[in-house]
Image (cartoon, helix red, strand yellow):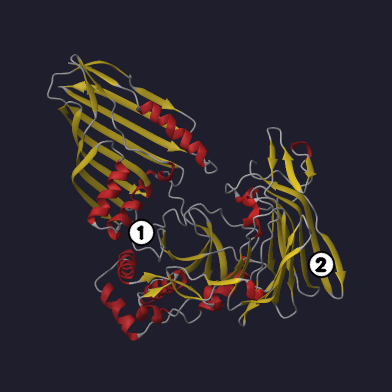
């Protein structure tokens, strides 16, 4: 655990001491100066009216210039979250004099509307600390009120990089007759519980927490307390969240009546599906219609952050957020006689899965599930490039909440582990031209995840931008692309992209009076290319020379089985044609880190980067 140096007093790893108001950490390697130290408290209170009061108290002592950002004040608010009060004071620690007293009007106020948003009420008040003299102290307190108790803040006691958290406290307060649920992760401490005046108070307190890196940690290693309600309500919609079924029932309420279509929309569905017999054909044609004619925007107005637009409004407006587009697609399928289910998912290619044993709002995206007799078709309704049935890395292999009339149930999205979804095949014919120059004619065939980028490239880039991307992807040194042709197929469940190109290479080999020295140029593979821990990567190269050649020396055939990959390479010289066949099958475990993948790719490079000597 390189990010967090465990809770409690840190034992033998650290000894803390103070000198002239500066704080140091003595590790087994070096003495480190902290940028700031902080004492912070979070009070979360559920009221009898199903409102959530959140009070933040912080006292930050800034020790140097790098610690100024630790004194940043940020308060998020919108139509459902109001700021009830705020106060702050800035003090010169050396003299004890007050530099400034802060009121709410002293904070900057900005909209958080994103570039792809049409309707959004999110705003932020913030204050940045500026100073040229240290140590400096900023102490502030504010309270926000949230209408409805569908969601609560998560308490994360650790601080910023190079910040000593002297004390972090959480107080969870709720009426005795209204239960609150919580999940504690990576905190070896029981809450202190007290009852007073009809309220339950739960208290956690941790001291001397230290984080020496700002690398993003695995969420499973972060200390936190997640909070969720039992009974909850928002904007008149109520349910129980003790089970996924109860939470799903609330979403089902919000969605009622949203899948109705206007007569014009129904006529369009009939027109598109006329003459089609199979359900899959109907799904594909309706999905493509939506991709070609509707654009994604963000809509985050009040309960609109959870409730989709009416499908008929989407039909007229030609846009929608993930909820609206999923509901619109659902409505079109319903009109075509096909049953589909609205689905909530925690999306993001680098996001962890949800805590399946803690029913709560852990989702940030909506997709669609179409149960079929033979299989299930998944639809990412915000994508303009993915084929029907392929979710890509954004929502693959994780638990999702399927919303039905009975409520919600957890299922998993596909992991796409078969070779069909993880394959690159390069077939290259290389002609040696003399003086180290060569011309390569290559067909690059990518399926599944390998094709994702090229699907987007062809749809959104002009020809010059496509060519620029090809240069980046091929990564040939001293290359000039003379012509290329890109074809993509996103009409089948497994997407495919085929790139044909003819490229002049300025320096492909070395030539002496007696021999040729060749280092075959294979496709460059990066860690980002291995999206779900496995890939079949095949290279077939034929190299022709105008001179008679004889294989003098070079690497013998290889057949290796390593921890994370299998590697096979075979080469032969026949009729003055050097043929090289190389196949790699990656098989990383799901918990592999990027550093291990990068090291493995370096190992592959060493195996590939072996010269072949040809005698003239």
**Residue 271 at x, y percent in the picture:** 26, 77
Closer to the camera in the image, 526 or 267: 526
Which of the image's four quarters has the N terminus? top right
**Image quadrant of residue 524?**
top left
Q: Can you tell which mark lies on residue 386?
A: 1
State the residue lying farthest toward the bottom.
263
Under tag 2, what secondary structure? strand
**Residue 457 at x, y percent in the picture:** 30, 55
Under tag 1, what secondary structure? loop
**Image quadrant of residue 546?**
top left
Q: What residue is rendered at 22% in x and 55% in y?
A: 463
Q: Can you tell which mark lies on residue 201?
A: 2
Closer to the camera in the image, 27 or 544: 27
Q: Of callouts 2 and 1, which one flags the residue occurring earlier in the amino acid sequence?
A: 2
Local crowd size for mark 1, using a 10 Å CA cut-off: few (<14), some (14–19), many (≥20): many
Contact? badges 2 and 1 (CB < 8 Å): no
**Residue 53 at x, y percent in the picture:** 71, 73
In the rendered image of this protein, does residue 355 appear above or below residue 541? below
Q: Is residue 211 left or right of residue 351?
A: right
Q: Nearer the viewer, mark 2 or mark 1?
A: 2
Residue 239 in view of the camera: no
Q: What residue is rendered at 32% in x and 36% in y?
A: 538
Closer to the camera in the image, 158 or 204: 158
């Amino acid at each position: 655990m390189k990010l967090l140096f465990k809770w409690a007093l840190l034992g033998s790893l650290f000894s803390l001491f103070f000198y002239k108001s500066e704080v140091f950490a003595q590790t087994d390697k070096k003495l480190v100066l902290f940028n700031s130290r902080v004492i912070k408290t979070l009070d979360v209170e559920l009221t009898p009216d199903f409102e959530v009061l959140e009070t933040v108290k912080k006292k930050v002592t800034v020790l140097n210039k790098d610690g100024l950002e630790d004194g940043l004040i940020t308060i998020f608010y919108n139509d459902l979250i109001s700021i009830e009060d705020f106060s702050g004071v800035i003090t010169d620690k050396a003299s004890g004099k007050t530099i400034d007293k802060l009121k709410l009007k002293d904070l900057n106020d900005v909209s958080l509307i994103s570039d792809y948003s049409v309707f959004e009420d999110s705003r932020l008040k913030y204050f940045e600390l500026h100073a040229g003299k240290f140590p400096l102290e900023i102490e502030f307190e504010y309270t926000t009120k949230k209408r409805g108790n569908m969601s609560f803040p998560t308490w994360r006691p650790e601080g910023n990089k190079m910040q000593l958290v002297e004390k972090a406290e959480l107080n969870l307060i709720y009426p005795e007759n209204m239960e609150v649920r919580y999940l504690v992760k990576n905190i070896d401490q029981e809450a202190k519980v007290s009852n007073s005046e009809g309220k339950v108070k739960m208290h956690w307190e941790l001291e001397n927490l230290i984080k020496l890196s700002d690398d993003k940690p695995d969420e499973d290693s972060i200390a936190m307390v997640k909070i969720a309600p039992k009974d909850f309500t928002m904007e008149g919609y109520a349910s129980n969240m003790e089970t996924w079924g109860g939470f799903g029932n609330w979403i089902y309420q919000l969605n009622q009546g949203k899948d109705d279509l206007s007569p014009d929309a129904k006529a369009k569905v009939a027109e598109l599906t006329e003459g089609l017999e199979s359900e899959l054909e109907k799904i594909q044609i309706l999905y493509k219609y939506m991709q070609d004619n509707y654009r994604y925007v963000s809509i985050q107005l009040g309960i609109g952050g959870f409730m989709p637009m009416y499908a008929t409004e989407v039909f007229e407006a030609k846009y929608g957020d993930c909820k609206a587009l999923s509901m619109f697609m659902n409505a079109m399928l319903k009109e075509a006689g096909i049953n589909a289910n609205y689905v909530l998912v925690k999306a993001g290619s680098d996001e962890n899965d949800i805590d399946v044993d803690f029913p709560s709002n852990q989702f940030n995206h909506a997709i669609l599930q179409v149960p079929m007799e033979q299989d299930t078709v998944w639809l990412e309704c915000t994508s303009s490039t993915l084929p029907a049935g392929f979710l890509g890395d954004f929502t693959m292999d994780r638990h999702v909440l399927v919303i039905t009339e009975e409520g919600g149930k957890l299922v998993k999205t596909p992991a796409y582990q078969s070779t069909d979804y993880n394959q690159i095949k390069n077939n290259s014919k290389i002609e040696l031209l003399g003086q180290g120059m060569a011309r390569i004619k290559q067909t690059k065939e990518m399926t599944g995840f390998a094709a994702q980028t090229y699907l987007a490239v062809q749809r959104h880039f002009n020809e010059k931008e496509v060519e620029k991307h090809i240069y980046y992807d091929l990564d040939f040194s001293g290359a000039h692309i003379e012509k290329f042709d890109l074809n993509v197929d996103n009409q089948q469940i497994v997407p495919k992209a085929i790139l044909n190109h003819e490229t002049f290479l300025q320096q492909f080999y070395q030539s002496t009076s007696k021999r040729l020295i060749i280092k075959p140029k294979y496709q460059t593979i990066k860690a980002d290319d291995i999206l779900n821990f496995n890939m079949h990567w095949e290279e077939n190269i034929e190299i022709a020379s105008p001179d008679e050649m004889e294989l003098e020396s070079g690497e013998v055939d290889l057949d290796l089985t390593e921890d994370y990959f299998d590697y096979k390479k075979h080469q032969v010289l026949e009729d003055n044609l050097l043929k090289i066949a190389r196949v790699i099958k990656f098989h990383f475990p799901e918990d592999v880190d990027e550093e291990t993948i990068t090291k493995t790719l370096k190992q592959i490079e060493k195996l590939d980067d072996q010269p072949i000597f040809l005698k003239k």
